Image (cartoon, helix red, strand yellow):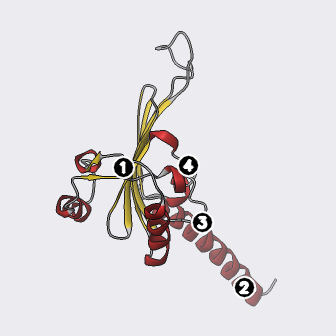
Amino acid sequence: MNVKNHKWLLFLLVSFFMTCQSDSDKKSKEYSNESVIKKGNVTEITSTDIERLGKVLDFGKHKPIKVEYRYVIIDNSGQNDRLSVPGPSDYSLEAVLYFNEKTFHAINDFEMDLEWMEQNHKKDEFNFEWLPQSVKEELVQDDRANYKGHPDFFFGTGVNGKAWYLDKKIVLQEHTN
């Protein structure tokens, strides 16, 4: 091989390794806003990963543009020494879902047209300790003492879900009994 071919081969190898490195950098940046803490059979996930939250909630036609959430899973599968009899796992979810204006209005209009008894949620139930300051302020300034919010129509939370609608965002919680 002549010098020209060696330079060409060296260029290809360097390009290949740089491409591989940039892919792994993207992956680490993609999950940089995620924290996973595991203590015994309890796992706490704090994240902004829409796809991961989409495995817990059903976004269907109403996918948020941004999310922030805290998801706690208590594994009662009997795979550890603490449990002698396995049972169903438990979880709790606290989340803020941010929507574009069109999607938020579609959700809000649909829900406000439904006829049901108000759920009388207290806004203090949605003032999670980890909430961003701007969401906390918006929640405090909301002058509704009680509010009906039913995330089960859009996100598949069933009877264990509660929601509080703010400006183009929904603060929600869900848990097992």
Q: In 3D space, how far apart are the residues under numbered discs 1 and 3 (Cα atoms)?
A: 25 Å
- Badge 4 marks a residue whose secondary structure is loop
Labels 4 and 3: the sequence-earlier one? 3
Q: Is residue 132 left or right of residue 175?
A: left
Disc number for residue 61: 3
Q: Horizontal and vertical percent for residue 11? A: 66, 82
Whether residues under marks 4 and 3 lie with C-beta atoms below 8 angstroms apart, the answer is: no
Quadrant of the image containing the N terminus: bottom right
Q: In 3D space, how far apart are the residues under numbered discs 2 and 4 (Cα atoms)?
A: 56 Å
Image: 4 above or below 111: below
Q: Residue furthest top?
A: 84
Give the residue type that dot 2 points to.
Trp
Quadrant of the image containing the C terminus: top left
Labels 1 and 3: the sequence-earlier one? 3
Labels 1 and 4: the sequence-earlier one? 1
Q: Horizontal and vertical percent for residue 132? A: 26, 60
Residue neighbourhood size for the residue with mark 4, other residues' Cα within 10 Å, grouped as few (<14), some (14–19), many (≥20):
some
Labels 2 and 4: the sequence-earlier one? 2
Name the residue: 59% across, 73% down: 18
Q: Horizontal and vertical percent for residue 29? A: 46, 64
Give the residue type that dot 1 points to.
Glu
Residue neighbourhood size for the residue with mark 1, other residues' Cα within 10 Å, grouped as few (<14), some (14–19), many (≥20):
few
Give the residue number, with chain letter if any, for mark 2. 8
